[in-house]
Amino acid sequence: MIAENLHHVQTRIAHACARAGRAGDTVALLAVSKTFGANAVAQAHAAGQRAFGENYIQEAVEKIQALQHLPLEWHCIGPIQSNKTRLVAEHFDWVHTIDRLKIAQRLSEQRPAPLAPLQVCIQVNVDGGASKSGVAVEEALALAQSVAALPRLQLRGLMCIPELAPDFVAACAVFARARALFDTMQQAGVPLDTLSMGMSADLEAAITSGSTMVRVGSAIFGLRD
């Protein structure tokens, strides 16, 4: 079932890219495996998936350790408290949820020297939701410039999780704000190549608007308890 679901999502991505006039290899798929066990991740890997996203750090570390024999790429896509930065720095390859300089500094300081720099994205509250994580749009450039200067991090791009829009056009309009910010940062000299946006329900709108990485969980692994 996971292999069939994964193929279906890959087909959706390919079709969305074709409709947007983009090459299919310009959008990466991040399989969000939170709450699903190591066996589910192993099944997805056997079907060709390599990159996995996790929201809950302790749960993720257990899976990372259980599956360390597989060549997987682990992305932290959940909020990070100060007391969890060391676990993230030691076990993950990517972090999508940098929204405070303090967290970025701790990750840089705690990244083990033998490991490659931690690949990171700035999380932006692109639709201004009061209860949403992420730095405000008007503050994102300054944060990105500070993060880019940290020695053990490599700034890659932006991530956003807007409220689910009522339709395709509305979703595109919100995602377009993130793309506009991405373009503005590139023009300001910030070296970005990743725009992480779009999930199971709205990946087509995100790809139309310029996403380079979609984060898909339920459409691959099924509904969560």
Image (tube, grey):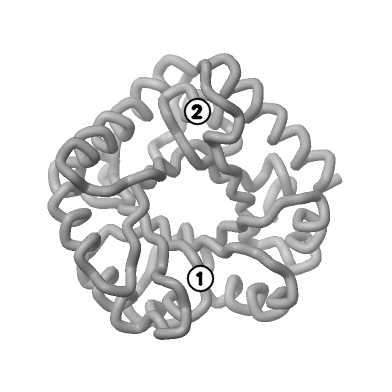
Give the amino acid type for the residue marked by disc 1 in the picture.
Phe
Q: How far is disc 1 from disc 2 in space, using C-alphas?
A: 25 Å
For image coordinates 36% across by 52% down, the residue present is 156
| Residue 47 placement, left or right of 117 | right
Q: In the rendered view, tell whether residue 23 sits above or below residue 225.
A: above
Packing grade of label 2 (10 A; few <14, some 14-19, many >=20) is many
Q: In which quarter of the image is residue 182?
A: top left
Which residue has dot 2 on it? 207
| Residue 185 placement, left or right of 118 | left
Q: Where is residue 174 in the image (x, y as percent from the top left)?
A: 34, 27
Whether tag 1 and tag 2 are in contact, CB under 8 A, the answer is no
Residue 83, visible in the rendered structure: yes
Q: Where is residue 223 in the image (x, y as percent from the top left)?
A: 71, 47
Q: In which quarter of the image is residue 130?
A: top left
Q: Where is residue 20 in the image (x, y as percent from the top left)?
A: 51, 17
Question: How many discs appear?
Answer: 2
Packing grade of label 1 (10 A; few <14, some 14-19, many >=20) is many
Q: Which of 18 and 4 is in front in this view?
A: 18
Q: In the rendered view, tell whether residue 167 sits above or below residue 146.
A: above
Give the amino acid type for the residue marked by disc 2 in the picture.
Ile
Residue 133, visible in the rendered structure: no
SS for callout 2: helix
Which residue has dot 1 on it? 92
For image coordinates 70% across by 35% down, the residue present is 9
Q: Which mark is residue 82?
A: none
Which of the two labelled residues, at mark 1 and mark 2, occupies the earlier sequence position?
1
SS for callout 1: loop
For image coordinates 78% across by 60% down, the residue present is 40
